[in-house]
Image (cartoon, rainbow, N blue to C red):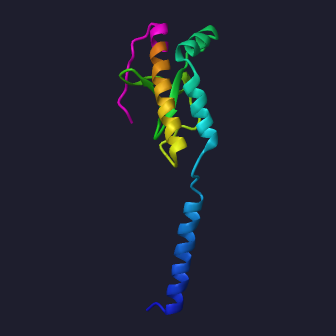
Amino acid sequence: MISPKQRIVGLVLVVALAGRGQAQIPQRSPDLLRRADSLAALDPAREVQLALERRDHRFIGVCGYACVAPGPNGPVEVSNKELRVIEGTTDDVLNRDVERLNEVAYAYAKKYNQLLLAALGRRPTTRPAT
């Protein structure tokens, strides 16, 4: 049988741990919001042109459970060596700023990769989403 003192100690411990977990979730992520705004301002066509001039044929990737290169008809089949990942993309959406970065990054990567495929003369080979 649990004594009243043990119940109080247990309740205090549960409340303390619950409060600690919530305090660690940021309401805002200003760095990720700035990254989303910077990415939204980029012109994918211009960025593909600059990448090709540097002989950089890597696709843009976004991460969730796994990192993928969004394409016009689903994820483009590429190796990890062919992927440049947009830092900060994740499936762990903690707040609006993370969600905005994920949305902007996915749209940008999809357009960029579509343009890169066309410039390289490759047909999009897709793989099942993971």
Q: Position of residue 15 (x, y in %)?
A: 53, 74
Q: Where the C terminus falls, by quadrant?
A: top left
Where, by quadrant of the figure, is residue 52 drawn?
top right
Q: Position of residue 64 (x, y in %)?
A: 47, 39
Q: Position of residue 11 (x, y in %)?
A: 51, 80
Q: How many marks?
A: 0
Looking at the image, which residue is at 43% across and 92% down?
1
Horizontal side, residue 53 vs residue 101: left or right: right
Q: Is residue 84 visible?
A: no
From the image, give the main secondary structure of the stretch colored magenta: loop
Q: Is residue 117 magenta?
A: yes
Q: Which residues are magenta?
A: 116-130
Looking at the image, which residue is at 49% across and 24% down?
109
Where, by quadrant of the figure, is residue 12 drawn?
bottom right
Looking at the image, which residue is at 60% across and 58% down?
24
Where 27 falls versus 42 (above or below)? below
